[in-house]
Amino acid sequence: MKHIKYLIFTIAGIAFLSCSDDFLNPLPETAVAVESFFQSDADVQSGVIGIYDALQGVNENTTTNIGDANRGVQFEHLLTEHRSDNTRNATLEGSKSDFHRYIVNANNVESEDYYQSMYEVIFRANNILNYIDVADAGNQAKYAAEAKFLRAYAYFNLVRLFSDVPLVTEVVGATDNEALFTRIPEAQIYAQIVEDLQEAVNVLDNSSKSRASKAAAQGILAKVYLTQPNRNYSGALQLCEAIINSGQFDLESNYSDVFYDELNDEIIFAIQYTAGNSAESQSFSSEFTSTFRQGREDGQNIVNANLIADFTAYGGARSEVSYITFNTTSEVTKFLPEGTDISISPPDYGLSARDAGNDYIALRYADVLLMHVEAAIGDGTSTTNIDALASFQKIRDRAFPETAPNSISSVSKTELLVERRVELAFENQRWYDIIRFGVADAILSAHATEMGYVYTSRALLLPIPAREINISGGLLTQNPGY
């Protein structure tokens, strides 16, 4: 990454590491390590940065043994895009190919790694909150709000993918199995997420795009309100309008700049990486190549034909930025490694394809504009709200500049879902969108039939990792069907 160095805070990271045999159970030595480390405001700030380290994860190219290091968000496309109708793995070999065929089991190492990574974020955040009094009085509220934002972000990912999960909001002992392994109902998880994000909204400012901010908290909270079982459409609408009316964000006129002019006006929250630095880089973008393979494996996020059909009909200027077809294989081009030139044959993918610096975009302004429309539709099927139509038109005008201004008189839920698909393709949103819109079963059943997969509704949740269940002695229960 470019502006803050997640991984250089080695001491802080060591203080939070968990043993390889029991991820949710901290090392007995951890309390001693943390206590001896947090002595000043600078130590606490380093610890806060250490939370981002857990989100950033470890480049698979530098440490290939998945048992040695968590990948953070670098496997997220497998758990989201691959399980939607957007993309698939190029091969049927290995556990990474299980996601797109809906045959993930409780021993899947990538699913387990993601579960572990999010709890690493949570435990690091809890440790910071435990020692917040060490920080200077003027910084305590900000550090606490930042830690709670990151804890909420991790729990939001977990609850959407696994449903009920252990809710751990304070430092617990290594033998406190009830706290570590009792699954808490979704409603309580969402209540904690909302509480944490509301504090972040009230405390943080918008001085950073690569760390927690007020707008990031507002945007994620809006998505929480749109997702939680008791939807809060009016709350989501207000939050989206607060971001829009702040005047601090805007769409990039060139869609390509969203992904290659990093921390641009459209970015609200991004997890950063640095090209060519094995400790600070990511490997997922190289794995999106297949025809001229740059990654360790034969292509992930291969684009499905039905998504290409939507790009053809609705993509406009977004299509050529989003994917390319070599022979008969369509590959993602949104996150090509720095230095890539696909205009030549064979393409040049730069000097550090496996140590790429492309940021992971967690939230951008276009997503907020489309959530604004979603909140305006609410429980209905369409909206004619003038402000929501203006938000939708901004997205359309950028995608179709030759016909701008593109007149929009109403937006239906169906139109919005397609627009989100082509606007946010390969940004790990499609899976959550089709579930939130209540159409996952219908879309995935049709997709599975088209592709020759076997889909059942059990696939709407991932299995709780078998290792965690075994460690808990059966206290941690499994999701239905696994």
Image (cartoon, helix red, strand yellow):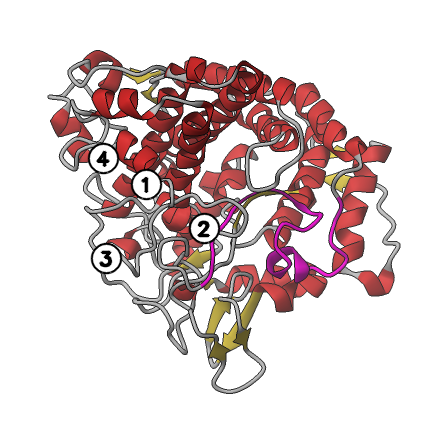
Q: What kind of secondary structure does the magenta stretch mostly adopt?
A: loop
Q: Residues within 10 Å of mark 1 (few under 14, many from 20)?
A: few
The percent position of residue 8, horizontal first and vertical second, equals 38, 45
Residue that mark 2 sits on = 81
Q: Earlier in the sequence, mark 1 or mark 3?
A: 1
Exactly how many numbered labels are in the figure? Answer: 4
Q: Are marks 3 and 2 in contact (CB under 8 Å)?
A: no
Three-letter code for the amino acid on which mark 4 is drawn:
Pro
Label 2 Cα crowd, 10 Å radius (few <14 / some 14-19 / many 20+): many
Tell me the number on the disc at residue 465: 4
Residue 391 position, x and y percent, is 78, 41
Q: Secondary structure at mark 3?
A: loop
Q: Say whether residue 274 is magenta.
A: yes
Q: Mark 3 = which residue? A: 64
The type of residue carrying mark 2 is: Glu
Three-letter amino acid code at the position of disc 3: Thr
Q: Residues within 10 Å of mark 4 (few under 14, many from 20)?
A: many
Q: Which residue is the site of mark 1?
A: 10
Dot 1 amino acid type: Thr
Label 3 crowd (10 A; few <14 / some 14-19 / many >=20): few
Which residues are the magenta region? 250-275
Q: Nearer the viewer, mark 3 or mark 4?
A: 3
